[in-house]
Amino acid sequence: MGGFYGRCMDIEEHGTAAQTMRVLIQHSHRGPKDLALATDRSRPTPTPGEYLIRVGAAGINFADVMQTYGTYGGGPQAPYAAGFEAAGEIIQVGAEVEHPLPVGTHVVGVGPGAFAQYMTMSAAGVLPVPSGWRDAEALGMVLNWATALAALKPLGGIKRGEVVLVHAAAGGVGQAAVRLARHYGARVIATASPGKHDSVRALGAEAVLDGRRPDLAAEIMALTGGVDVVLESVGQATFEVSLSVAKPFTGRVVVFGAASGETELSTHDLVFNHQVQVKGLHIGALAAAAPSWYHSLLVEIEALIAEGVYPPGTPQVHALTDAPEVLRQLEAGLTQGKHALDPWR
C-alpha cells in the first residue's frame, strides 16, 4: 500500500518515543507468584497488519490465571510477557494494514503482552473505544461481552420468554450475560457466592443462588421447571447441575470455562442421562473459524452501546505491580466484576 499509510507511522509524547517499557513477565508455570515486573524490556515493533498501542488499561481475565499454570490451551510458554486484553492509543501503524485507523485513535482489542506499557494488536481485531469512554471503560468489549453475546445468540439461540441460567454471574462475562439475557426478553436465574447476590440481582436476575449449595439442581428446577440455555464457565463444581437442569433435547449448555476444574462427559451420559445440546465456546477460536459470526457480534455490540444497553464498564483498576495478588484473588473466587491494570502506575 503506497503513500503515507504504506510507511510505518509513529507518534509519542513530545515527539520522542521511549524504547524501553515496564512489563510483567511470567517466569514459570507455578502460578501468579512467579509474575514479576521488568522495567527495561524493549518496546515491541508492529509487524505487517498490526498496530502498536500505548496501553491505557489492561484487562484481567481468568485465562490469565490459567496461563500462569500452563493449563490454557495453546497458551504461551514461560517465560512470557503476560496479559492479552487491553485498550489504548494507536501510536504506530504497521505495513499492509488495510483502511487503517488514524494514529491517536483509542482502540480495544487483544494481543500478546498486554500487561505492559506498549503492545501490538492485529488491526483486523480491534474496535474503537466509544466516544466519551475512557480506555478502562472499554475493556471487555471484544472478550467478555463478545463471549456472553456468542453464548446467548448464535450458540444459545436465546428466545424471548426462555429461561437462562448464568453461572459465575458476578464475573465479567457473567454480568454481561445477565444484562444481555434480560435485554433479549429471557428470565435469568444466576449463581454467585452469597456476598455478590445483591449486585447480580441489580442487573436483572430473577433469582440468585449460591452455586455451592448441595441442592442447587433441585432449587433451580423448582424455580423454572427446566432451563432453556445454560452458560457454563465454572466446570467441575456445577457441570453436572447444568446438564441435569437443562431441558431434555431442547436445552442448550454452552461451555466456555472451567474455573473450578475440569470434568468429563461421556457418550453414555448424553444418550442415557442427559439428552441435551452441549456446545463449546472459545471466542478467539470463533473469531478465527467463523469470522462472519464474530464480525456480526462486534456489529451488534456497537448497536448495544448506541442503544444504551451496554454502558461504560466500571472495572477496578490496579497498579501493574498488584497483578499477582489480583490474579490470586480471581483464582480464589474473591473478585467481582471486571478488574484491570494501569501499566503507568
Image (cartoon, helix red, strand yellow):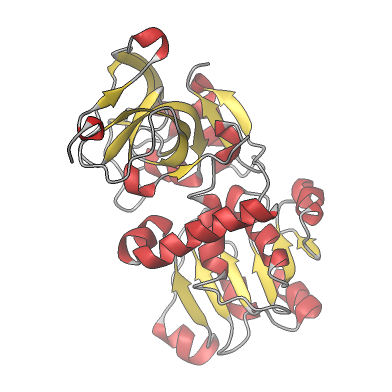
Horizontal and vertical percent for residue 106?
Answer: 48, 33
Horizontal and vertical percent for residue 176?
Answer: 63, 54
Please name whichever residue, 85 or 34, is drawn nearer the observer in this view of the structure.
Answer: 85
- Residue 99 appears left or right of 193: left
Horizontal and vertical percent for residue 246?
Answer: 62, 80
342 to 303, vertically: above or below: above
Q: Residue at x 29, y 20 (%)?
A: 43
Horizontal and vertical percent for residue 235?
Answer: 52, 62
Is residue 203 in view? Answer: yes
Please name whichever residue, 223 or 121, is drawn nearer the observer in this view of the structure.
Answer: 121
Q: Residue at x 70, y 79 (%)?
A: 162
Q: Residue at x 57, y 33 (%)?
A: 136
- Residue 126 appears left or right of 161: left
Is residue 215 in view? Answer: no
Give the residue furthest to the left: 2
199 to 264, vertically: above or below: above
196 to 290, vertically: above or below: above
114 to 243, vertically: above or below: above
Give the residue furthest to the front: 3
- Residue 253 appears left or right of 174: left
Please name whichever residue, 309 or 152, is drawn nearer the observer in this view of the structure.
Answer: 309
Image quadrant of residue 132? Answer: top right
What is the count of numbered marks? 0
* Quarter occupied by the N terminus: top left
Q: Residue at x 70, y 52 (%)?
A: 308
